[in-house]
Every structure is written in structure tokens, then in C-alpha cells.
Amino acid sequence: MKSFINTVNGLPLIVKVLLCIPCIEIFYSVCRVINGAAKNDILWIVLGILTIIPGAAFMWIVDLIWVLWKGHAFLLGDTYLG
């Protein structure tokens, strides 16, 4: 699972920005849950689940800003806000 997250974080910037489109952004939400499972951290899993349905309305904006600023989607780094 960790290799999947590393692959997603290694994508070119344009692909990461395209994955921030509102309907496609669900991919990053699923990646957050996978990242939590890979780290065996319940907080990561809960935050990932919360971004799937209730967070879908605004998370694409947060992810777009985060991808342009940090180079990866929100909660897909090594630390919570990494």
C-alpha cells in the first residue's frame, strides 16, 4: 500500500492537478484511507473517510491548493499537514 501512495505522489504535477477536478477528486479521498491503513493510524483513516462524502464539496479546492503548494494532496504526505 505504501508503494501505491508513493506512486501517486510521484505523478507529474499536471496529472495531480487534473485529479483535483471535483468529480475525480474522490480518488484522493480513497488514497487518504489507503494511506491511513498503510500507517495503521486510525486518525488518518477517519480523516480520509470524512473527506469522501461530506468533504467532497470543498476538498477539491483544498487539494488543488495543497498540490500546487506542497506537491501532493492534503493528508498524503509523511505527516498530517506535511
Image: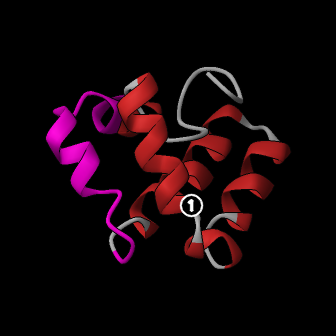
On whether residue 74 falls in the magenta region, the answer is no
Left or right: where does residue 70 sit relative to residue 62? left
In this view, the residue in front, 13 or 2, is 13
In the rendering, at what x and y percent does residue 51 appear? 65, 64
Left or right: where does residue 19 sit relative to residue 42? left
Tag 1 residue = 59
In the rendering, at what x and y percent does residue 68 appear? 36, 33
For the point 41% across and 32% down, which residue is it? 72
Q: Amino acid at mark 1?
A: Met
In the rendering, at what x and y percent does residue 29 appear? 53, 60
In this view, the residue in front, 53 or 68, is 68
Decide: is 44 above or below 25: above
- Whether residue 42 appears in this view of the structure is yes
In the rendering, at what x and y percent does residue 3 appear? 37, 31
- Whether residue 30 appears in this view of the structure is no
- Mark 1 surroundings within 10 Å by alpha-carbon count, few (fewer than 14), some (14 through 19), many (20 or more): many
Number of disc labels: 1
Left or right: where does residue 7 sit relative to residue 60? left
For the point 39% across and 72% down, which residue is it? 22
Decide: is 73 above or below 79: below
Q: Secondary structure at mark 1?
A: helix
The segment highlighted magenta reads 6-23
Quadrant of the rendered image containing residue 25: bottom left
In this view, the residue in front, 37 or 26, is 26
For the point 74% across and 66% down, which residue is it? 50
On whether residue 14 falls in the magenta region, the answer is yes
Quadrant of the rendered image containing residue 35: top right
Q: Quadrant of the C terminus?
A: top right
Left or right: where does residue 11 sit relative to residue 57? left
